[in-house]
Image: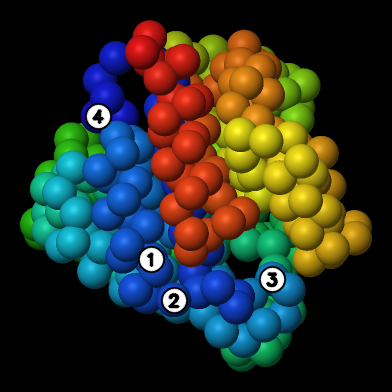
Amino acid sequence: MDVGTGDDSLRFGVVLHLSGRKADWSSFVSFAREAEALGYDSVWVTDHLMSPTGIPKAFEAWTILSALSQLTSRIRLGTYVLCNQFRYPSILARMVASLDKICGGRLDIGLGAGWFREEHLTFGLSWHPHSIRIERLGETLEAIRRLWTEDNVTYDGEYVHLRNATLDPKPTQKPHPPIWVGGGSLAILRMVARHGDGWIPSLPSSEQLSKGVSFIKKEMVNIGRQPERLQVAYGGSGCLIIAKDQGEVGEMRKSLLQSSDKSSNLSNCIIGTPDQCVERIKEYEEAGADMIVAGFYDFPLTKGLNLFAEAVIPYFRGG
């Protein structure tokens, strides 16, 4: 699996939240280009039809990612994470193969079962119990992997049906772009073990990450997969706060708390001075993380993005 810098050092990605009041095309472009210039490994886009806070403003993930592929040259491009209900598997497989060709093999695919009921109902999509969404996700993962690696694919599942289907061209990356499964339920952990190249849970604690990694690797051994090939990412929301001054950190944290859903658990956000951020990230690295993927709270400003690149990333790259 060809990801990151090609060595064993911790990798770093940034999340662009494509929905909400701050969502803006020109800001996405400048932020992604700045991240690439600063040496970040990847940029990831969210996938919603409306903001999880209820704000209607939202850009479509695949359109934005395709456009960014032509405005960047080195940085990898990922989805954090696609909702499986939004695109039929054969169409998704074609989209992935096409964009992987267009971007020169820089694509990572994050895919999840979907969790935001309200956006489904608002935009006329069927909403099913978690067990059914998990079953559909499993069939999708099986079907797209076969389409990327085989010809004349016939698949007869409960939800996915293919008949003598051949995908041409295949993706640039071989055997296919890395598949990251999002979520943290026990069913998702089993899905990662069976079908995933990587696991990218949203805002886990270091303890949750460690326990999840241990469970997935044991499951991989049980089904004959190689656990040492598992990639693990800490998936952060748009709550990474970094500043040189503790007072500024406190002010930004206060603003974040005021703007967030009070039921949200912000204790797993990476927040602090550079030294404090390093210590927090070390906890996730020790828990098994190979990559930190996080959204900066001060977006579309790039102050935090620059400070993080200057004062945090070098610690993990021996700089």
Badge 3 marks a residue whose secondary structure is loop
Q: Residue at x 25, y 43 (%)?
A: 37
Residue 52 disc label: 3
Q: Could you say which quadrant of the image residue 36 lies in? A: top left
- Please say if the residues under marks 2 and 1 sit with CB atoms less than 8 Å apart: yes
Q: Amino acid at mark 4?
A: Asp
Point 24% across, 29% down: residue: 2
Q: Nearer the viewer, residue 319 or 16?
A: 319
Q: Earlier in the sequence, mark 3 or mark 4?
A: 4
Task: Report which residue position mark 4 lands on.
Answer: 2
User: In the figure, 47 relative to 20: above or below?
Assistant: above
Q: How many marks?
A: 4
Q: Amino acid at mark 3?
A: Pro
Q: Can you identify the residue that label 2 sits on?
A: 24
Q: Is residue 67 visible?
A: yes
Is 296 or 121 nearer to us in this picture? 296
Where residue 315 appears, as percent x and y from the top left, is 46, 15
Regarding mark 1 in the picture, which secondary structure is present there? helix
Indicate which label's residue lies in the foreground, 4 or 1: 1
- Local packing at callout 2 (Cα closer than 10 Å; few below 14, some 14-19, many 20+) is some
Packing grade of label 4 (10 A; few <14, some 14-19, many >=20) is some
